[in-house]
Amino acid sequence: MYTIGIYITSFFLKIIALFNDKIKLGIDGRKQTFKVLEGNLTPKDKTFWFHCASLGEYEQGLPVFEILRERHKTHKIVLSFFSPSGFEIRKNSPIADVVVYLPLDTKKNAKRFLDLVHPDLVIFVKYDFWPNFLTELKHRKHRAILISAAFRKNQPFFKWYGFKMREKLFAFEHIFVQNEQSKQLLSSINFLEVTVSGDTRFDRVSNQLQQNNTLDFVSEFKAGQLCIVIGSSWPEDEELLINFINSTSIKNVKYIFAPHNIKENQIKNLSSQLKLSTILYSEKEGKDLSNYNVFIIDTIGLLSKIYAAADIAYVGGAMGLTGLHNILEPAIFGIPIIIGKNYSKFPEASDMIKNGGVVSVKNNSELNNELENLLTSKKERGTLGDLNEAFITQNKGAVIQIANYIRI
């Protein structure tokens, strides 16, 4: 029944793709997967297969991937994504020899994919549990591990009706989880090969400090003033921030928006609502950026460095239901962070709120109060920022644990 459902879903996705560019990218990309594998792999190649649902999971897995790349230079690395937002941005990743879309989860596709890849080791990051692929991995006795996993008690694995999904987890020889709660949940279904290693993203973001994070255009725009960076924002986030920017009496503050969606119509809609002088990244050449109050980044790949210039960060995704984006990226720079209200699926957010460096707001009133408090108190900014930086430092080490476990 499940496989039939996949075929039915595939049919409807092809129809939806006529009106949705992102889905069309995925469908077109999957058509090329087997051709790309056949053209780049031979039966004699030694391979590792890394799978990530999207870009965030790639960033989580990257420190582990880098260690394996360095240790095993003769192995070819196959990197697969399910989402176009991961594949399109990292299709030229230097960590991999071959980057492809994961085919739809049919029995036929799983067998053909593994025939071509024949991996010595498989690493899945966080989630993306595809039953037919996991069944085939277990049947072939491939070594497979899951890293940076975080489980919740409301997932099917831990319900009476979830026995089919439960058994799929046993395709993994070992699971590295982010917290003790996840380990206990796995223990309740008798999966005991578990290590509480934490989240590899702590190691990943810590590496950012070793890079040159200065962006000249950001320094020119900021011009020594306080700066709020609104990262990975969605319309629900932007509505609140726009209200604050247009109404606050606090002067000499710069604002940088780095929206999740950078389509032209979305950018125009955002800029048209702002009353302060606004410039787009795509229009910055030849302009005196210090004359503008709001900078909208209508490109990708710069946010992690832009956070380095922030005095306060607002991280998007949690005011609506799309999902909170990465709050660890700004935290490593020792700045206070504000997020929306829907963060329960993100353990790091709950932990950092309890720790004191991250603040969750539900509405305009709460956001305005928090921003006014932080903008007018250097001491408060420093206190929250120090808590975030210390939290990152204290939680590093997952990568070493995973790397020590993996011996080929």
Image (cartoon, helix red, strand yellow):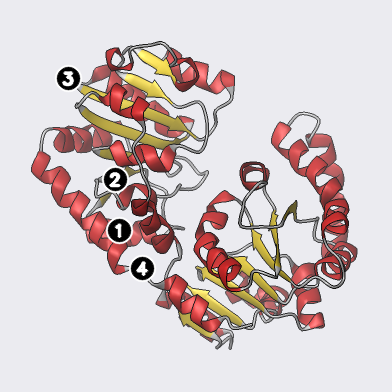
The residue sitting at 79% across, 44% down in the picture is 29
Residue 309 showing in the rendered view: yes
Give the residue at x 28% y 68%: 394
Nearest to the eye among marks 3 and 4: give it. Answer: 4
Marks 3 and 4, Cα distance to the nearest angstrom?
38 Å
Callout 1 amino acid: Met
Taking depth in this image into account, of 207 and 181 the one nearest to the observer is 207
Residue 184: x and y, percent? 47, 82
Q: CA distance from mark 4 to mark 1?
A: 14 Å
Q: CA distance from mark 2 to mark 4?
A: 19 Å
Q: Could you say whether the residue bearing mark 1 is in a helix, strand or loop?
A: helix
Kindly identify which residue carries mark 1: 352
In terms of sequence position, does the residue under pointer 4 or pointer 1 come before the other?
1
- Circle number at residue 337: 2
Please tell me which residue is depicted at 54% across the width and 62% down the height of the picture: 61
Say what secondary structure mark 3 lies in: loop
Residue 178 seen in the figure: no
Q: Are marks 2 and 4 in contact (CB under 8 Å)?
A: no
Q: Is residue 55 left or right of residue 350?
A: right
Residue at 21% in and 21% down: 248
Q: Residues within 10 Å of mark 3 (few under 14, many from 20)?
A: few
**Element type at marker 4?**
loop
Disc 2 versus disc 1: distance between alpha carbons?
A: 10 Å
Viewport quadrant of the C terminus: bottom right
| Nearer-N-terminus badge (3/2) | 3
User: Disc 3 and disc 2: Cα gap in Å?
Assistant: 20 Å
The disc, 1 or 3, on the residue closer to the chain's N-terminal end is: 3
Q: Is residue 54 left or right of residue 253?
A: right
Q: Gap in Å between the C-alphas at discs 1 and 3?
A: 29 Å
